[in-house]
Each structure stands twice: as structure tokens, then as C-alpha cells.
Image (cartoon, rainbow, N blue to C red):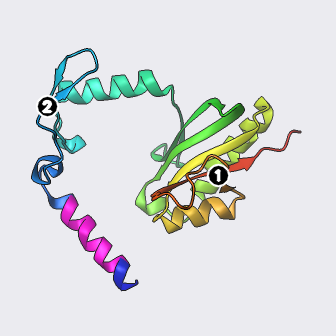
Amino acid sequence: MSAAAATKKKIVKKAVRTKDLLESNNCIPEAMITLDGDPLTCYTSWATNLPSETFEWVWTLFEKNMRLIFLILKNAAGDDVAYCHYRIDMDHDYAVIYCYEIQVETEYQRKGLGSIIMNVLEKLAVKLGMDKMMATVFKYNIRSLNFFRKIGFEEDETSPMEEAERDYLILSKEVSVL
């Protein structure tokens, strides 16, 4: 690991241990008001510390706004071992399957589950007549970038410009029609 990366890793670890990042770093403006005059407040919380009613509200709003579909992999014993949430949508005049996230249980990582998930999604994209598959990946997540590049994804035309201070890339893969 380079010295710069080691320094960044320390910054991340410190931030993760900080109780209230927004308040301790003076990121909350004195006045937050909607365009129509409603005053607002704000706070941060780890998901595990959210009051149950807030957690339920967050999840309900997330489901309502995101229209996500979950692909779940189970092992032979019937245990859930990996999931992907994705969406079928239009993106800049293209019909796409957008992979938002892949999560794999630790003991199943690096065993091909990500490839299995993406192969299933690609087959679906072909059958539905989609133009491409897309994913957003943090620039620093080298394992994830390498994974998507290995399976044929490239930087999409809608990805932020190189000159911009970008911390993520939008990747895509054109879908071959049968």
C-alpha cells in the first residue's frame, strides 16, 4: 500500500469511529429551510442505532423511490449467501439493468458468486431487449473495478469527467441481442 493510501485509510478509520461526523466537523448549516419555507434539522446514525420507527421509514421510502428488485443466492442448505439489488430503467435514452450493489457473505467471497449474479442479470437484459447493463463503482474500490472490467464493463459515457474530482465511476456493458 502506498503512503498516500495508508494516510487515506487512517482518515477513513478515524471517520468511521467518530460518533457524529456532521456535527463534529461543523457541516450542518445554522439554518436549513426548504424552498417553500419549512425548517429542517439533520443528524447521522449508523443503521444499527436508528430507532426502529426511523429504520422502517427509511426502508419504506427507499423501496418506494428506488423500485429495486433483489436477486438472492442460496446455498444447498437454503441459507441466503449473496444478493444483488438492481433496477430496470431508462438511463439517458437507453434501456438498462442497473446493478446497484452486490453483497456476498464472507465465507462465499471470491468463489464466483458475483459472476453468477451478473451472468443471470445479463441473460435477463438480453431476453428483455435492454441496451446495456450499468453499475456505479467507487474509484478506490479496486477489487470491484477489476471485477466489472473482467466481465466486460467499461467506463460509461455518462461517468463524471476525469478533470472533475470524482470518487466514483459509472461503468456499463452493451448487451448483445439474441
Residue at (19, 17) in percent of width and height: 38
> Where does the image place residue 151, in percent across and percent down from the top left?
69, 59
Q: Is residue 174 left or right of residue 141?
A: right
- Under circle 2, the secondary element is loop
Q: Quadrant of the C terminus?
A: top right
x, y (%) of residue 156? Answer: 66, 51
Tell me which residue sits at (57%, 43%) in the image.
99
Q: Which residue is mark 1?
A: 116
Residue ID at (14%, 57%): 18
Left or right: residue 8 versus residue 21 is right
Q: Which residue is mark 2?
A: 31
Residue type for callout 1: Ile
Q: Amino acid at mark 2?
A: Ala
Read off the magenta span: 5-15
Q: At which x and y percent is residue 61?
A: 35, 23
Residue 52 highlighted magenta (yes or no): no
Query: Where residue 65 sits in the image (x, y, percent)?
Result: 44, 24
- The one nearer the camera, 127 or 8, is 8
- Per the rendering, the mark at residue 76 is none
For label 1, count other residues whose C-alpha is less than 10 Å away and answer few (under 14), some (14-19) or many (20+). Answer: few
| Quadrant where the image shows the N terminus | bottom left
Horizontal side, residue 91 vs residue 35: left or right? right
Q: Nearer the viewer, residue 169 or 56?
A: 169
When the figure is inspected, residue 72 is found, relative to residue 67, above or below; the finding is: below
Q: Residues within 10 Å of mark 2 (few under 14, many from 20)?
A: few
Task: Tell me which corner region of the image, top left, top right, bottom left or bottom right, holds residue 57.
Answer: top left
